[in-house]
Amino acid sequence: MSATAQTKTVLHETFGKKSLQKHWHIVNGSWTADQQAVVGVKNTDWAIMTSKGRLPDNYVLTFNCLVDSNAYLLEVMLNLNGEKYLGILLNQLDKVVAIEDRSLFSATAPDRFIRSTGNIGKLPKTDYPPKYQWLHWKIQKTGNLLYIWINDEAVMLYTDEKNLLTPKGRLGFAVNGTVVIKDLLLQATRGQDSKPPVTFEARPLKKYFFNFSE
């Protein structure tokens, strides 16, 4: 490894019962360790869990997931600070992958709710037909750039011009249905390793026909 290439493993999660309790907050729904994976099942609306640790400034996150065909939405929650975070949405109903400005409402009600609360209709999304199979995700944050691959295919590049990727936020997952997640690896990158990929050709973005009022 060169002097300018610096990668450090922050979390290598195989989702045993003890590590699930050690590294994650169960916010809503049911999350259970099962054969080196975690199974999330919604209650009324959502199954939500968030990490106890914070994300590095620059990082590469990889994991595998299997989303039930009856779950219309899987969400990767990035840089959660307070209620606010950036969501990467695998929307199986609308057949898109989308970036959204999201909020996790932690009111005293028994359920926790997720909503888009800012920049509605202004953030990127791209067509992505549902694939009811194991999906391998790779997400790279480099400065204000976010690169997303699914099954080794470049899906989306997001430039965070609105400062939604707040520093030192936490990681989370939410599903409106059932999901299995395994083989999660979070690495902090610095120097050469934090540079953008040499080649990245994302899917074409969909155009929003109008912006919702906020």
Image: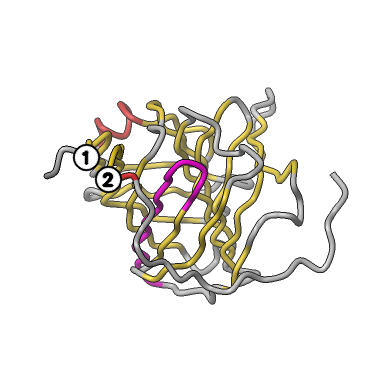
User: Residue 117 at what x, y percent from top left?
Assistant: 74, 41
State the image quarter where residue 126 is shown: bottom right
Q: Residue furthest left?
A: 1
Residue 109: which disc?
A: none
The quadrant of the rendering that contains the C terminus is top right
Is residue 157 a member of the stretch shown in magenta?
no
From the viewer's side, name the closer residue of 77 and 138: 138
From the viewer's side, name the closer residue of 57 and 196: 196
User: Residue 152 at what x, y percent from top left?
Assistant: 34, 68
Q: Are marks 2 and 1 in contact (CB under 8 Å)?
A: yes
User: Residue 146 at what x, y percent from top left?
Assistant: 48, 51
Instruction: Give the residue displayed 47% in from the left and 37% down from the top.
Output: 49
Secondary structure at numbered mark 2: helix
* Kind of residue at badge 1: Thr
- Is 59 located above or below residue 151 in the figure? above
State the image quarter where residue 81 is shown: top right
Instruction: Give the residue displayed 37% in from the left and 59% down from the top.
Output: 137
Instruction: Give the residue displayed 26% in from the left and 51% down from the top.
Output: 183
Secondary structure at numbered mark 1: loop
Q: Residue furthest front?
A: 3
Q: Which residue is mark 2?
A: 192
Instruction: Give the residue displayed 46% in from the left and 41% down from the top.
Output: 143
Q: Is residue 7 left or right of residue 31?
A: left
